[in-house]
Amino acid sequence: MKKLKALSACLPFLFLFSCAQQQHDNKDKGLETRIDNLLSQMTLEEKIGQMNQISSFGNIEDMSGLIKKGEIGSILNETDPQKINALQRVAMEESRLGIPMIFARDVIHGFKTIFPIPLGQAASFNPEIAEVGARVAAIECSSVGIRWTFAPMIDVARDPRWGRMAEGCGEDTYLTSVMGAAMIKGFQGDSLNNPTSVAACPKHFVGYGAAEGGRDYNSTFIPERLLRNVYLPPFEAAARAGAATYMTSFNDNDGVPSTGNKFILEDVLRKEWGFDGFVVTDWASASEMIPHGFVVDEKDAALKSVNAGVDMEMVSYTFVKYLPELIKEGKVKESTIDNAVRNILRIKFRMGLFENPFVDEEQPSVLYDTPHLEAAKRAAIESAILLKNDKGILPLNGNVKTVAIVGPLADAPHDQMGTWVFDGEKSHTQTPLHAIREMYGDKVQIIYEPGLAYSRDKNTANISKAAAAAAKADVVLAFVGEEAILSGEAHCLADLNLVGAQSELIAALAKTGKPVVTVVMAGRPLTIGKEAELSSAVLYNFHPGTMGGPAIADLLFGKEVPSGKTPVTFPKMVGQVPMYYAHNNSGRPAQKNETLINDIPLEAGQTSLGNTSFYLDAGFDPLYPFGYGLSYTTFEYSDVKIASSQLKKQDVLSISFSLENTGKYKGTEVAQLYVRDKVGSVTRPVKELKRFTRIMLQPGEKKTVTFELPVAELAFWNIDMVKTVEAGDFGLWVAGDSQSGNELVFKVTD
Ligand code: NOJ
C-alpha cells in the first residue's frame, strides 16, 4: 500500500520532479564527500581549469605546461596511447592536486571497426545492434585511452537535406529514444568504473535536427510543446539510461542559443530529469554566441554559458580567460563554479580515473578483433533495407551465371564507412566488389566495369563500357549513392537526387534490358524514384561500414534475408521535405486520387473547394513511408486483438496478433505498433510509433505476438503544458510499416 502511494505521488508532471529529487537524495554520500574534500583544496584557477577542454595540438610539452598549471580538465582528439599516458602522468604526478584528465573523441559508429552509420543502425529496429556496436566501439577506443565519446547523436531529424541526419536515428522520437538508450548502455557498459567503459555524451541538446531548411547550424523555431513532445524525449531517455554527460547544440531555438539556454540546461535537464553529470559545449559554441548576436563578446559568452548551466567549455577558452574577472565582479557566483566542478569531478570519480588513470600500453590490441568484425557484419546485414524486388529477382539464384558489377560505390572502401570516421581505415574495409569476388566468385562470373569513378563524377565517357558489361551479364549489380563526405556536419544538400552522372548510368544500364539491381550506399534518403522505376530491385544501405561488402554480398546471394525498415520517410522530391509520418492532420487532409498537375483543365477557374493539403506535382504520399522494408519472404498479419478496449489511465494496453511467414525463406519481420490520439486539447499526430519488435519465422511458421503498452505512455504535453494522458478514443495499428494495417479503436477513461 505504501509503495502504491509513493508511486502515485510520482505521477505525470510531478513524476519528473519528485523522482529527480529522489535521485539527488540517493547520491553516493561517500563520493560527494570525496568531491567536496578535493574541491576545498582547489584554487579558483584550478577549478576553472577543470572546466576547460582543449583539442590536442600534438605537442606534449606545450600541453604538459598547461596541465601542470591545472589549466585543462579534458583533451579531445588525442588517440596515441603513449601520448595519452604521458599527458595523464603530468596530470597525476606533476599538477598540484593530481586530478586526472579525461580524454575524448568522436567515436560515433565505431573506432577502428566501423559499424553502419547510426541512421543505418536505426534501420535495423534492433536496439541490440546499437548496444553491441557501441560496446565494440568502447572496447576499441578505451584500449588506447579514450574514455569519453561524443555520442550518441539523438537529434530527431525530419529533413534529409540536413547532412547530420546520417549521425542520428532518423525522424522518430520513440525509435531514437530506444536506440539512443541502447547506445548509451553499450558505451558505458555495466559500470562507468570498468576500464572498457566510455562516458556517453548525448547530443546535441537540443533541437539541432530541426535546423531551418535543413541547413546546418541554422536557427530552429520549436515551440515548447513540440520540443517536449518530439525533441526532448530521446534526451530524457538518455538521462534515464544514465548518460554521464550532455553536449549543447549549435542552434538558437526561438532566439536562444542552447549554450546559453537556462531553461533546457537547468530547468529541464537538472531539475526535471535529475541529471548529475556534466554538460559540455559543442565546439566553440560558447564564443559562437557572438555571431548569433546573443552575447557582446567572449567575456559575455563565458558569463551567459556558465550562468545557463554549462560545466565545461570545448576549445573556445573563454572560461579560462574571463571567469576569474566575472567572479570578482560578482557576475558569476563562486558557488556556480563549484557546482560545475563538482559535476565534472563526479564523473571522473565514477569512471575510476583517479584509481585507474592510465591505459595499458602492453595490452594485446583489440582493434579489428574477429568478433568485432562479425558484429559489424551482422549490423550491416540487419540495417539493409529492401525497397523493391520485382519478380523475386533477389536473391540471385542458380540461373544467374554472370553478373556485371558497376557503379562508383562498388569498390569505394573509404566512402562506404560514411561520415564521422576519424579512425577507421579504408585498408580494413571490405567492399562489395571484393566480397562478391571472394565469397561468390566460384558461383558466378564477374565483370567489373565501374562506369563512373566516384559518386560526383560527371564524366559519362565510361558509361558505355558499363552498359556493354551489363549486356554480357544475366544481372547487373549497380552500386550507387553518396561519397562519405556528402553527409555529416556542415554537409547539407539542397538537391536529393543522385549526384554526378549516376542517374545516366542507371538509365544506360536499364536500356540494355538486363535486370538491374540497384544497391545504394548513402548518408540520407535520396530521391531515387526514377532510378527505382528503372531497377528490378533496390537494396538501400545507409553507409554500412567496414563489413558492408560481405553483408551486402550475403544479402544479394540469399545467404541472408533483408529485414531493415526505413527509419525516415523517403520523399519523392526534395520540395516535399520536411516530410514525416507523425505529422498532425490539417483541416483538409489529403485524399486518395487528388487532382494532380496534369489533370487540371486549361483555364480552370480558381476554387479551393474540394481541394486538400497536397502538392500538385508530388501529391501527398512519400516514395517510401517510415517503417517500410521488404523481405525475400512475405509476412501476413492477422487476428489483431486488444485484450480490453476500455482502459483506465493506470492500465496496460495489451495487443496480440498473429504473424505468419507465408513465403519461402526464413525471415525476420519488424512488427510495429502505432497509436493515434484522436482528439486532444491540442491536435495530435496522425500516428505515433509506440512499440516494435523483430520476429524471426521459418517458412510457414506462425506465431502469436503480444505488445504491452502502459496507457501512461500515451501521455503528451497538453494545452496546459502538462504531461498527461487525456481521456478519449484512440486508433491503433499493428503493421509492417507506418502506412499499412487496419485501424482498431480503444477508449481511455479517467
Ligand atoms: C562539432 C560537432 O557538432 C559535435 O558533434 C562534435 O562532437 C564536436 N564538434 C567535437 O568534434
Image: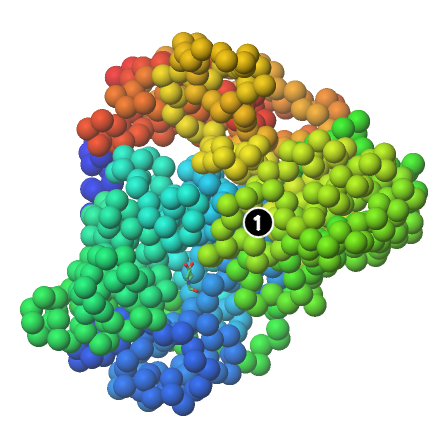
Q: Residue at horizontal 28%, vertical 65%?
A: 287
Asked whether 378 or 649 is in front, the reply is 378
Pinpoint residue 749: horizontal percent, then vertical percent. 29, 15
> Quadrant of residue 459 in the image?
bottom right
Asked which secondary structure carries label 1, the reply is loop
Residue ranking furthest to the front: 603
Dividing the image into 4 quarters, which one contains the N terminus? Answer: top left
Asked whether 490 or 400 is in front, the reply is 490
321 sits to left or right of 193:
left
Pinpoint residue 405: horizontal percent, then vertical percent. 81, 49
Asked whether 523 or 281 is in front, the reply is 523
448 sits to left or right of 459:
right
Inspect this view and state whether residue 335 appears: yes
Q: For ligand 1, give the image quadrant.
A: bottom left
Mark 1 lies on residue:
523
Pinpoint residue 424: horizontal percent, then vertical percent. 60, 65
Few, some or many C-alpha atoms within 10 Å of disc 1 (few <14, some 14-19, many ≥20)? many
Inspect this view and state whether residue 440 appears: no
Q: Residue at horizontal 36%, vertical 14%?
A: 729
Q: Residue at horizontal 60%, vertical 42%?
A: 497
How many numbered badges does the structure rendering display?
A: 1
Residue type highlighted by circle 1: Gly
Dividing the image into 4 quarters, which one contains the C terminus? Answer: top left
Does mark 1's beta carbon lie closer than 8 Å to ligand 1?
no
